[in-house]
């Protein structure tokens, strides 16, 4: 899935959902990237939607496909498939994670790590830097508040990368629950950006362009600090 954009033939995805997930034992975190991935695929290939659905639908697969259909903007297909998806049952966790999604993946407002995973999935389907730019914009909204916030976003990212974890216990006392939660999500975003830029040239190029266009900002400095030294 992560490199589909290099050979974007939809026929390669027949049976992919069955191979990628095992219901009910797959971790729920497997599913949000699939929602973003198939949102892009369904929009690009609406005539293939039913062909790409798994023969067996459990609650997790059904919730993911419903989210992908919504984010794709293919509302006619969503209406047609709603009865079949409804018969698969309801997964409360994924239903909550996918609540209030927009009708275009480009309109997604990042609030949770699930939203980040959706955008990374859309990136892998398309090879389009716009989804990475959405993640960078979210990092900037948080990091550009002040230099200390930017430092704490970077420390949080480093904690998720295996560095010191002390920062995760300090944020709520320093900022309060809501602001701390946003810093944590921004740290997850920075961590994901760094990891994906290592593997995907188009994401690394998007990061490089952002740093160049926003030189001197706290967000650009945080991105530069965590960027692979060989770049």
Image: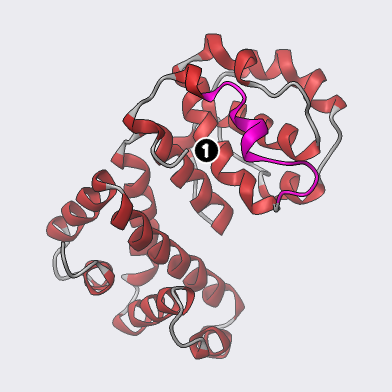
Residue 109 percent coordinates (x, y): 49, 48
Q: Quadrant of residue 17?
A: top right
Q: In which quarter of the image is residue 78?
A: top right
Furthest residue toward front: 19
Q: In this view, does 201 lie above or below 78?
A: below
Q: In this view, does 137 lie above or below 158?
A: above
Q: Nearer the viewer, residue 62 or 182?
A: 62
Residue 31 percent coordinates (x, y): 63, 44
Query: Badge 1: few (under 14), some or many (20 or more) residues near its Cα, within 10 Å?
Result: many
Furthest residue toward top: 47
User: How many tags in the picture?
Assistant: 1
The magenta segment is 13-26
Q: Is residue 228 above or below residue 162?
A: above
In reply to whether residue 81 is colored magenta, the answer given is no
Could you tell whether 85 is left or right of 143 in the image?
right
Residue that appears at 74% across and 32% down: 62
Residue that appears at 43% across and 83% down: 163
The quadrant of the image that shows the C terminus is: bottom left
Residue that appears at 72% across and 35% down: 61
Residue that appears at 80% across and 45% down: 24
In reply to whether residue 24 is colored magenta, the answer given is yes
Q: Nearer the viewer, residue 91 or 73?
A: 91
Residue 141 percent coordinates (x, y): 37, 63
Q: Mark 1 points at which residue?
A: 36
Q: Which of 147 and 18 is in front in this view?
A: 18
Q: Colour mode?
A: secondary structure
Q: Which of 163 and 184 is in front in this view?
A: 163
Residue 228 percent coordinates (x, y): 23, 67
Could you tell whether 112 is left or right of 124 in the image?
right
């Amino acid at each position: 899935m992560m490199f589909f954009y290099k050979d974007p033939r939809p026929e390669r995805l027949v049976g992919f959902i069955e191979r990628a997930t095992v219901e009910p034992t797959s971790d729920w975190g497997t599913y949000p990237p699939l929602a973003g991935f198939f949102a892009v695929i369904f929009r690009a290939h609406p005539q293939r939607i039913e062909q790409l659905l798994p023969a067996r639908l459990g609650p997790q697969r059904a919730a993911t496909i419903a989210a992908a259909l919504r984010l794709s903007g293919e509302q006619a297909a969503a209406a047609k498939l709603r009865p079949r998806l409804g018969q698969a049952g309801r997964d409360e966790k994924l239903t909550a994670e996918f609540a209030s999604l927009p009708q275009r993946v480009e309109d997604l407002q990042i609030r949770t790590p699930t939203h980040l995973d959706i955008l990374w999935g859309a990136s892998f389907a398309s090879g389009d830097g716009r989804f990475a730019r959405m993640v960078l914009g979210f990092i900037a909204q948080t990091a550009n508040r002040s230099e200390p916030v930017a430092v704490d976003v970077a420390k949080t990212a480093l904690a998720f990368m295996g560095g010191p974890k002390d920062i995760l216990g300090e944020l709520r006392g320093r900022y309060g629950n809501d602001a701390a939660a946003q810093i944590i999500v921004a740290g997850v975003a920075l961590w994901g950006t760094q990891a994906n830029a290592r593997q995907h040239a188009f994401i690394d190029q998007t990061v490089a362009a952002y740093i160049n266009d926003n030189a001197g900002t706290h967000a650009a400095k945080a991105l530069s600090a965590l960027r692979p030294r060989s770049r």
